Image: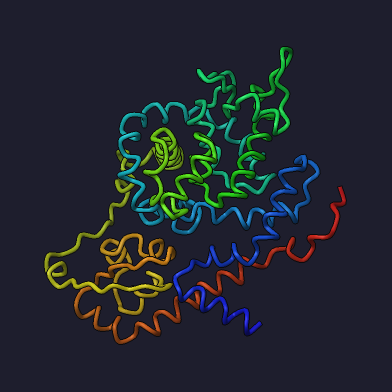
Amino acid sequence: MRLFRLFLMMVLSAGISAANAQDNIKKAGSDTAMQEVIDSRAEHLSKDKVEYVQQVTRYGFKNLFKNYTYNPLIPYSQQINPYAESYMQDYLNGHKTYLLKLQKNATPYFNLIDRILSQYGLPHELKYLAVIESDLKSNALSVAGALGPWQFMPGTAKLYGLRVNQNVDDRMDYTKSTYAAARYLLDLYRNLKDWLLVIAAYNGGSGRVYNAIQKSGSRNFWKLQYYLPEESRNHVKKFIATHFVMENGNQGNGSMYAQDAAKPVIPDSLKASITSATISGRYKASVIAETVGMEWKVFNMINPNLDNVLSTGENYDLKLPREKMDVFEDRKYDILNKSVEELLNNVRIDSKTVYGNSGNKKSGR
C-alpha cells in the first residue's frame, strides 16, 4: 500500500492528472467491463458493472467541465473550460432561439434518452447529441443515408443490433435506436476515453480522430481540434452550445458569463502589481488561492484553466499580485504537497467500486 501511494505521489507530482492515473491503474478492468456492457442487452446488465462503467466514463468530460460534469447550482463560467465560450459563441448566436423553441417539446424525448443512457452508465449530457444529429426527429434523413434520431448509417445500425431491411427500419424507433446509440457511444469511449473526441468521431469516424491524435501528439480536444475536419470540429461546437442552451438558456443573453452578476472586476491597482512565475506539477488552483489568501473568483479570473493545463503536464504562467507571489514562493512546496494529497484522496474515493471486487461473479438475472 505504501508503494502504491508513493507511485501515485510521483505520477501526480510529475504532472499527470488523477483521472489519467486512475485510467492507467484500472485500464484492463475498465476495458473488459465496458466491453461486457456493450455486448449485453440492457435488461441483462448487472448493477455492479454499470456502476463501475459509470465511474470510468465520468472522467470523459474532463476537458469541458472542471468537475467532470455540469452542476446547475454553480454559475456556468466557474465550471466550463474557458476555451468553450469563444469556440461555440458564433453557433450560439445563430441558433439559440431555435434551440429554446425545440426545448419546449423535448422533455419526453430527453426522459427516454436519459433512462437508457443511465442503464449503460453513460452521462446524461450525451442526450444533446441527438439534438444536433436530428433535431430529435425520428424520420430525419441525411443526404448520405443516415436515418433516425441518432442518424445511423445502415451498416453501423446493423452492427449494434438494429434491423434495417425492406420491411422494417429500427433506426426510426426511438427506444431501439437509443439503445443502439448508447452501445455505440460506449464503444467509441472505450478507445478514445474522452467524450469530446467521441462526439467528433460520431460525426467523422474514429479514424479521423486517431489521425488528429497522431499529428498533434495529444488527446486533448482543444489541442488537436485543428487537425480534425471542419465538420467534426463544428459538431463539437454545436454540442457544447446545445448543452449550454438546454441547461442554462433561459438565463442571461446567450453568454455563459451573463448570469454572473457578481463577477469581480480587477482594480487597476491590483493589475499594476501582478507578476508572473512559470510553474509545473500538480498544483491545484483552489489550494494556491487559499494559501496565498486570495479571493477565488479573482484568482480564477487572472489564472483561467490552471488545473486543466497543469493536468496535461505542461507549464503554466501563474499570475499573482507581488505580495501574494512572495507567499507562494515561500510555501510552494507545501502547496504542491497539499494539492497532490487532495488529488490522491479523490483517487481513493473514486476507486472504491463494487465491480472491482466482484468482476468474476455472474449476474443473477
Above or below, 58 relative to 348: above
Above or below, 47 relative to 7: above
Q: Is residue 90 visible?
A: yes
- Residue 323 quadrant: bottom left
Can you say which quadrant of the picture contains the N terminus? bottom right
User: Farthest residue in the bottom direction?
Assistant: 330
Q: Residue at x 72, y 54 (%)?
A: 32
Q: Is residue 245 visible?
A: no
184 vs 243, left or right, is right
317 vs 143, left or right, is left
Foreground residue among 178 and 8: 8
Q: Position of residue 354 (x, y in %)?
A: 74, 63
Above or below, 150 relative to 345: above
Q: Residue at x 70, y 29 (%)?
A: 176
Q: Position of residue 306 (x, y in %)?
A: 35, 64
12 vs 97, left or right, is right
344 vs 28, left or right, is left
Q: Residue at x 24, y 78 (%)?
A: 324
Q: Residue at x 19, y 78 (%)?
A: 322
| Total tally of numbered discs in the picture | 0
Foreground residue among 265 and 226: 226
Q: Position of residue 156 (x, y in %)?
A: 64, 30
Q: Position of residue 289 (x, y in %)?
A: 33, 73
